[in-house]
Amino acid sequence: MTDFSRRDAIKIAAGTALAGGAAFKALLDSAEAFAQESQWKPEKGAKLRVLRWSPFVKAEGENFTALVAAFDKVNGTQTRIDALGYEDVRLKAQVAANSGVGPDFVWNIHADNHLYPEKLMDVTDVADWIGKRGGGWYPIAELYGKRRGRWNSIPATIGGNLLNYRISHIKKAGFEKVPADMAGFLKLMQGLKANGTPGGFAMGKASGDGNAWCLWLLWAFNGKVVDAKDNVALDSPETVAALEYAKQLAQTFVPGTASWLDPSNNKAFLDGQVSLTNNGISIYAAAKAQNMPQIFDDMDHAFYPIGPVGRPTEFHSNYPYYAYRYTKSPQACKALMAYLMDTEQYNKFLAGSVGYLSHVLKAYDNHPVWKEDPKRLPFKDVAARTLPFSWAGSLGFSSAQVFADFVVVDMFAEVGTGSKTPKQAAADAQKRAQRYYNT
Amino acid sequence: MGPDAMAVSAAAVRGGARPGGFLSRLNHSRNMLGLIFMLPAAIFLGGFLAYPLGLGLWLSMTSAKVGDPGKFIGLANFIWLTEDNVFWLSVFNTFLYTVVASVCKFALGLWLAMVLNNHFPFKALIRAIVLMPFIVPTVLSAIAFWWLYDSQDSIISWVLLGLGLIDHHIDFLGDPWNARWAVIIANIWRGIPFVAITLLAGLQTISPSLYEAATIDGASGWQRFRFITLPLLTPIIAVVMTFSVLFTFTDFQLIWVMTKGGPVNSTHLMATLSFQRAIVGGSLGEGAALSVAMIPFLLSAILFSYFGLQRRRWQQGSRDD
């Protein structure tokens, strides 16, 4: 992941304001047009504190800061943007929910709006307006954004997590592209290993990459943590089948993936140590940013294979906007949400995100960001392909805890490292999941 | 202001100056003065130590979650934990981590202190350098170790491969036992300076004449260490080791940066598991119970040092026999 600090953001904002006069003028014009038309009028002199995660891709961060600067200028508001690592944003946002003090507006990850829904502003009017302007929400956005029929967050975007692979290495293993079936995929991984150019997925406490491939594999075999009624259903023949597959798959991994945290596979891939892994587009973006043609020319992205269940079972992360009820400037918060999601701004956001973050509104299927570079194309469909991490149950505390406590990742890692048999691991994980669902 | 009030305030002013008046009595009352001078410290301790501790105890007996104060559920959280294998694994890890790291830190720290206690050139400078691991922010040293232990890019593996001593990268943090030893070594590296410098201060209070006398009597180096250095250093060892055990037992940052408790929970300490459950997972009650479960162990470590090592009779002026 690219490091990008708040200080950088401020520098860039200042740079944009000074140097990019014409570009900033265009932003001001569209902010002005939005303000004229908008039904949400920011409170006079409102001071907003926005908490967001540190941008993974530089251009997205610059763009966000510039858009907010234009919003401030037009509306006479003052917005301070604090950017933290995404895990820290979750913590800070939780503390704010508990204490009633902190940022007004948060750009978070996953579904924390389902953990403290009564602390959050109802934004149903904003969501309806955005949905109409954007050609309708993808179903996953409604699922994440709504609770009991009301929207308490704006699911701004989905961050895709797909297969990243080295083109020449899979060719050498005898494949033109990544097979779409489980048996073929295993063969590819075995071929890569035999050629001394192995792949690898994180089996450590990697909350993004670890959960993404483990949930895909569990669901691909129709395993699930809970059924539709939130009854724990992890200890099943389907789960065991997924684990049996994982056991063979893990034997093809580059050594050391049991220790991998989220950044580890990015580093190993850029280093040429791993030929196939799962990640967002950030490896590709970093290879371009660091001018490493030997990597970016020779890599591409692919969907995960489809398992016996017969449909995509991927997991991509939701990044919602929400605002707290305690804010003194509710109208400014709503206006900022609507503004960021409105056509002009969302177009810029998608362009700046270069495929890292994908649209959740159907009108953007044809956005130029998906046409400029064919290697970004798979990320176009992530909102349509992802399941919620709570699958097949409901979003809320229990699902968040199972996710945060690495119940599924640990289960796969236990089998992958050979410390437990698939049956044992499934039975133990069932017990761990029950702890969270039976309260 | 009415005449009565004026009379009263005038009396008060006069009273302040008169011997036996309030201020003067206050001035002479040691108890009152003592109380007043202690008050800021008491408020500070109450607000920043007792209150959070009390709150933690209370939380551990509730079903509190993020955004939900929860309700009193007695010891349910603790009973819950006793049935949790990951909790017991974290207890085992914490004990292993604390015992091995503390013993090594003590042995190496004492050895380093005795080396530093000798005369050599640039003594002050070298003593300052020894403190470095302690001064560097823990997170930075943890990141440095994380790189040293990297599964693909470890410089240790790279050097050993180059020397032909191994034929593949060492999986420092991916194998449960490797990972345990790796984080323990990082903790030892970080903790040695604290032990060494404090023991060095203790060593310097031992009068050289004792060693001279012992040498004249024909005591060997070992005997001088065993019968002079060690007994006279015991009180400070007790203090240092109490602190060292407490720091190690409650360690969090090193683990969180290097492994987050992985692989498969084999380096989860009670502190990291508590954080994962309470803050990342949002179960404040369960996380608080995990933290509270550490208290008995910490208390017994303190009591052990207090009764076992601190209150030696010679410290109170009588012979130690």
Image (cartoon, coloured by chain):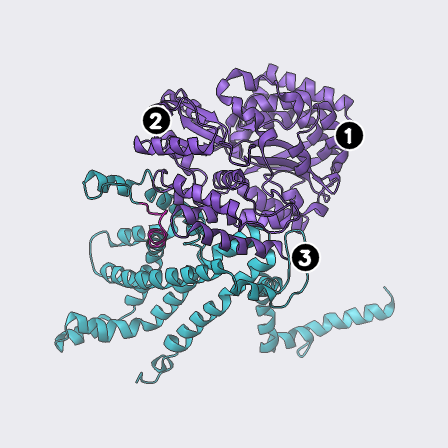
- Nearest to the observer: residue A363 or residue A186: A186
Of the two numbered discs 2 and 1 on the same chain, state the one appearing first in sequence. Answer: 1
Residue A217, relative to residue B77: is it above or below? above
Q: Circle 1 — which element?
A: loop
Q: Is residue A244 left or right of residue A155?
A: left
User: What percent of the width, then of the height, locates residue A427?
Assistant: 50, 54
| Chain painted in purple in the figure | A
B172 falls in the magenta region: yes
Q: Quadrant of residue A21?
A: top right
- Nearest to the observer: residue A191 or residue B235: A191
User: What percent of the width, then of the height, locates residue B34?
Assistant: 57, 73
* Residue marked by disc 1: A41
- Label 1 Cα neighbours within 10 Å, binned few <14 / some 14-19 / many ≥20: some
- Asked if residue B8 can be seen in this view, the reply is yes
Kindly identify which numbered label has been placed on residue A173. 2
* Residue marked by disc 3: B69
Same subunit, labels 2 and 3: the answer reads no
Q: Amino acid at mark 1?
A: Lys
Q: Amino acid at mark 2?
A: Ala
Give the letter of the chain under mark 2. A
* Most common secondary structure along the magenta stretch: helix
Residue B160, relative to residue A188: is it above or below? below
- Nearest to the observer: residue B85 or residue A297: B85
Same subunit, labels 2 and 1: the answer reads yes
Q: Circle 3 — which element?
A: loop
Q: Residue visible at 33% across and 34% down? A: A193
Q: Which residues are magenta?
A: B171-183
Residue A386, relative to residue A247: is it above or below? above
Q: Residue visible at 45% across and 54% down? A: A424
User: What percent of the width, then of the height, locates residue B244?
Assistant: 39, 62
| Chain painted in cyan in the figure | B
